[in-house]
Amino acid sequence: MRKYSVFAIAREAMRAHKGWEAQWTSPEPRSSYDVIIVGAGGHGLGAAYYLAKEHGITNVAVIEKGWLGGGNTGRNTTIIRSNYLYEESMDIYEHSLKLWEGLSQELNYNVMYSPRGVMMLSHNIHDQQSFKRHINANRLYGIDNEWLTPEQAKAFVPVLDISKTARYAINGAALQRRGGTARHDAVAWGYARAAADRGVHIIQNCEVTGIRRGPGGEVQGVETSKGFIGANKVGVSAAGHSSVVMEMAGVRVPLHSNPLQALVSEPLKPIFPCVVMSNTVHAYISQSDKGELVIGAGTDQYNSYSQTGGLQIITHTLDAICELFPIFRRVKMMRQWGGITDNTPDRSPIQGVTPVPGLFVNCGWGTGGFKATPGSANLFAHLIAKGEPHKLASGLNLDRFRTGRLIDEAAAAAVAH
Amino acid sequence: MSSSSNSGEFRIKGAGRHTPARTARFTFDGKSYTALEGDTVASALLAHGVHLLGRSFKYHRPRGILTSGPEEPNALLDVSRDAARRQPNVRATVQEVFDGAKIASQNRWPSLKYDIGAFNDMLSPFFAAGFYYKTFMWPREAWHKLYEPIIRRAAGLGEAPKEADPDHYASRYVHCDVLIAGAGVAGLTAALSAAATGKKVILVDEQPEVGGALHFDSSTVIDGQNGFDWAQAMAAKLKAMPNVTVLTRTTVFGYYNHGFLALVERVTDHVALPGRDLPRERLWQVRAKKVVLATGSIERHMVFANNDRPGIMLASAARSFLNHHGVAVGRNVGVYTAHDSAYEAAFDLKRAGVSIAAIVDSRSHPGDGVLAEARALGIDVLTGHAVTDTSGRLRINSITVTRNGGANARKIKVDALLISAGWTPSVHLFSQSRGKLRFDEANQRFLPDIYAQNCISVGACNGTDDLADLIDEAIAAGGGAAVVSGENRFEWTGGMIGAAEGAGPEDAVKAFVDFQHDVTAKDIRLAVREGMHSIEHIKRFTTNGMASDQGKLSNMHGLAIASEMLDRPIPQVGLTTFRAPYTPVTYGTLIAHSRGDLFDPARKTPMHAPEAAEGAEFEDVGNWKRAWYFPKRGEDMHAAVNRECRTVREVGGVFDASTLGKIEVVGPDAAKFLNLLYTNTWDTLKPGKSRYGIMTREDGFIYDDGVVGRLAEDRFHVTTTTGGAPRVLQHMEDYLQTEFPHLNVWLTSTTEQWAVIAVQGPKAREIIAPFIDGLDISNEAFPHMSVAECTIMGVPGRLFRMSFTGELGFEVNVPADFGAAVWKAIWERAQSMGACLYGTETMHVLRAEKGYIIVGQDTDGTVTPDDSGYGWAVSKKKTDFVGIRGLKRPDLVREGRKQLVGLFTKDPKDVLEEGAQIVADPNQPKPMTMLGHVTSSYWSETLGRSIAIALVAGGRAKMGSTLYVPMADRTISVEVTDMVFFDKEGGRING
Amino acid sequence: MLLIHCPYCEEDRSELEFRWAGEAHIARPENIAAISDEEFAEFFFLRNNEKGLTYERWRHIHGCGRFFNAARDTVSDRFLMTYKAGLPKQPIPVASKAAAIAEEKTVETWEATEGDAR
């Protein structure tokens, strides 16, 4: 792999950029691999990269139905943070955040991790109690998260309306300064390039149609639109399609696939310095480096694989955005799109072994999978290589739905009394 | 060529459809201009010879007007009426001039002519597509601190508004039989046909007048008259029909599921002095049984070196400016085309007195008709030639022309260049409706193939070019009948997609594919070389098609260049998805009325106004406004709450409990039903009595709680938490309708029906006694947890003897309409006896002193009844209730679960922070093992010390032990105690 | 925004009037107190999450208030039928099934694999 640098760019500039090599190749699949990963999103590509780099397993294929990075990796609003409440969540998201901090250098690919701060607005006493619970738990766990007064919040985000007369006035905010954004496509491409460089095969436009199992029930490989491909270990990381793929092995996972929509505005000069989220009015917003306001909307209420959703979800989100930032009412929506999120009953991910020997699953990241990409990939690689979860991911198992030991971040946000 | 008015020296007398006498004044970058009414900003500026309107996104190259419609990528301007009514990124080709408009260029500094950012253009060899993924990585922190801020400042186009938008917007929901998008020949004909059936028809067009391509196409004759005039006549006819709505200046921007379409109507942006009652824009949300797409097609540009200079524009745009606006885009105009349609632009201009430098046609064999006409008009046509370069810093001044293959290069002077690579069918809405496209190899275009909804494409957007065929198709689509006949002067041939001769192959050439984002042919080639083989990868890597025009001009060219590089046919390279909106839509329009008070209407209790008059501060609880505390002059919150607490305990207090959810559960099986829905037992509850109940879901975690009174054998008055009322009713209805339909029970929400006034404290009975008729409320006759229907101040009411303070207490329920009057009467008497009004904060303190929990504060969806110390409320005898199995799961019965306990700080004056975390060893390294957290914490005026409730792992076994609450600045020692801090014997409640 | 036929009101109404209520035909075990942890997890958490034909429940919450069942294609979001609560799982009428299958192909190739480089 030829290293990227400003010098490489200067050299290429002199020869009309003719010398750049392909970032990844598109090989025909071998008849078998040591490991097959289903799904070439950030999680799957990253897992392949870490399998090769940290576990010496390079005979790996990542099989993708469409184009790499084309699922939720390329459809999300790129928010990164680790200020979750429960230890299981803090473990994995903070592991991820630490990897984000060095990811551009690790991959020699600028993923534009931008720790511009993630601010969550508190609108009432209930929010305040919940945020302080998070802040205190984060502090004792070694994760940055701080409480801001409304005035401090406005100093950080000057366009914020903190007037007391607002319908949902702001009584403070929680700020994680290390939180921020990254360039979503670059994460998929950076992992793809680095994994391919270590020998990983990335096989696009290849749909998995079945999972073949041996007499003992163990995994033998996958049936695909390009024929059977053997492997004794298969890791499924297929986001919204995880239920479909797992069903091929006869494994049911507690997931709902829901459309999640997002939208961007026309490009504007810098006006919005960080990420702002509000659970009470259901909105999150940041501004991309290109100048678009990037706004995340809610999920539609029903199960769907259609990657589209209702306009009412978008308008409801914009109601909230314009209530928080009345100066944006004349801004224009330029593009809206949808993804399919895979949601578990406790809104926490599932990563672990399955009842099928050799079959591993990584799913259920819901609306928050992007921020977890490096951490999830890293721990998924460990799981596949060792056959058992890393201790940072040991709580994310499927068994929790039997025992009742849920990681209920949504419940922890609780409801108004 | 001359101009009689001051509306611009490039106005052509006798051309165009505007009235010379009707003028409007506007400024552009501070300079004043006169326009004609009906001008777009683009046509008005062109009339004055102004071509330089903006700077591109990345290289800050000078840019002019490329199009005459919503696909415009270059001419984006800042348009304002006043400081608050300022709109960035407005397309000059769409915005109509109004008198007094202030218009400014964007993305340039210090001025449009001299822009420092243009330095980027010189550095462009370094700024190839995706260069930023390859650098700016060292040192680690520099991306965020150094590089990113520079890139962000350079990027973006317009400046966001600085003030809240004072305009208002409207919204409308409509159902119709047929919605027709586009009112060109096809749309109008389809509308005439559909209207004839009597069906409810909506015809929509984005331009100020109907006509579509007839705006520029002056040679088409329909029903014996000029096409544009015919269109206006047909629109008038349709408007007069009661079953037809014609919407102009309206864009169908989204085609969603199940025949749902969203339209934006621009109501006042073209008006100098809009009426105050008019909305700026109106959102139409239409459910259409059938949709006819007559969205036409969009002309493509030619891709060649330096094809972006001001003065270069689409041939059809130049025709629009001439034939509709009466403006010549230059005095010596060149044409570079691969399609016959551009010839007609040359013909029109030539006839208007403009000299045509040459028509350069990349084809060897243009259509015979246009070729003959060109010869007849004396226009020089160079077939099999290419324009390989252009020059001119702020406006094109010459073109370099060669024979195809590069021979015989020469320069030709021009002051404008018209370009056309043919026409791209507008399949955006079809794609949004999730129909499938097919590639029309012969004509190099994507056309509708399989429909996913009840819609039909007609005309140019369906690839139907022949006018007679188009009319037949439109009549059929309308489902009725119409008689329309038309004829074209010329039958158009030709068209190309991808890079033209002048786009390379040498990769130093800037041949723009996507103008706004500065994506060139070589960028797309580079993306392919770097392994980006999917069109989505190419799009994302180069940003082709991601600018505010969303690829209307660039997508097909980009695809063709990629296809050539990959040596794969176009259908195999794919096409990026067209997403809503078709053109950008103002947030204000999308939210319409949903702002301010209507954003999320606040729920207020019947006593809200009198409470406000008493000086209440309110807090938001869900969407309710609840009285929080009642400060007297000079009191802060703490002083007020301390006084209120003291007064309630010593005398009495009046509290508004109306927000609590109320559900009437009625029927012969009501008790059986509640037995199943609550953990407690209800058939043992006697009429006239009430009981505290806990509700769990199947998972066994506390879902809600509240007091339930039994008014009769078959009638219960159920109360829920304030926030829980709707979901509890949904939960109950779900079980009643689907799991227990054999039970004979009715559920009715009565939350808004009852105003609830809680009177608590030693004098509570004395306070309410005079208002109660027909009921003995003595302690003996009406003990704690009694309920009765009675007459309260002459109105039928319900009285509960209950307490959430630990004091003697009643809750007076009266019909909501009488709430304020009864409240006033009770408060007047209470006040005279020395009692107080108290709010939710005092309520919280008083209940915490008694160890009463608040679901949602002390519990969070992971807490079982036993965890909260309410295990007694779970029946051991019942064989079934919702939650019975979930409660027995391994993790819910394990040792060491978090349990609610009391905490005393070692220093009684320390009030813990709600949400603070608790540890056993404060000196352990991070990450620390946390035992739980503080759920409620207050200063207890009654006890003269702080109190707290906390969830602590194995809490009840830790009574008396010392734990620690490490805060940022210090560690607080706490002792685990019982949760009941006050009146442990509970004697006061029976006072 | 979906358009949903309420089998009680016998009208097509906008999705705004309805609330989705999860997979249909999952009966609460009559002996729920006696089932195993695995059986409970299956009953309470595991759902089919089909890609394609799904049977689900809706409630006409801002209308008649009734819960009812629906058969819908989760790829196209097209409703194949709705029917009253308490009725057993209904077979799909042949006509709407054919329409759904045709549509599924359409949408699958268009939206889900948009921009394929096959």
Image (spheres, coloured by chain):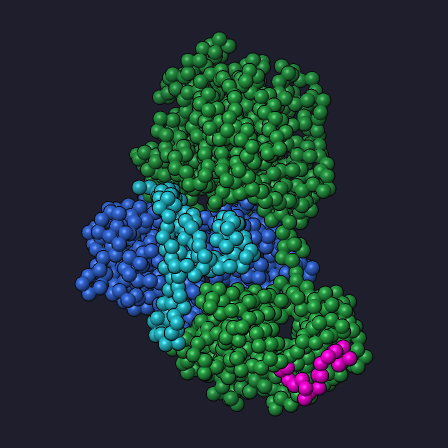
Instruction: Estimate the x, y position of residue B129 in percent, counting from the top left.
Output: 42, 41
* Vertical order, C52 against B385 (above or below): below
The residue positioned 60% from the left and 80% from the top of the image is: B687
Residue extending farthest right = B832
* Vertical order, B608 against A13 (above or below): below
- Please tell me in which quadrant of the rendered image residue A132 appears: bottom right
The residue positioned 32% from the left and 34% from the top of the image is: B569
- One can see residue B822 in this view: yes
- In depth, the one of C53 and B787 nearer the eye is B787
Chain A color in figure: blue
Side of B730 where A378 appears, left or right: left
Tell me the quarter of the image containing the N terminus of chain B.
Answer: top right
Instruction: Estimate the x, y position of residue A254 in percent, counting from the top left.
Output: 38, 63
Instruction: Estimate the x, y position of residue B806 in percent, counting from the top left.
Output: 64, 84
Chain B color in figure: green
- In depth, the one of C18 and A94 nearer the eye is C18
- In depth, the one of A270 and A164 nearer the eye is A164
- Please tell me in which quadrant of the rendered image residue B719 appears: bottom right
The residue positioned 46% from the left and 75% from the top of the image is: B881
Chain C color in figure: cyan
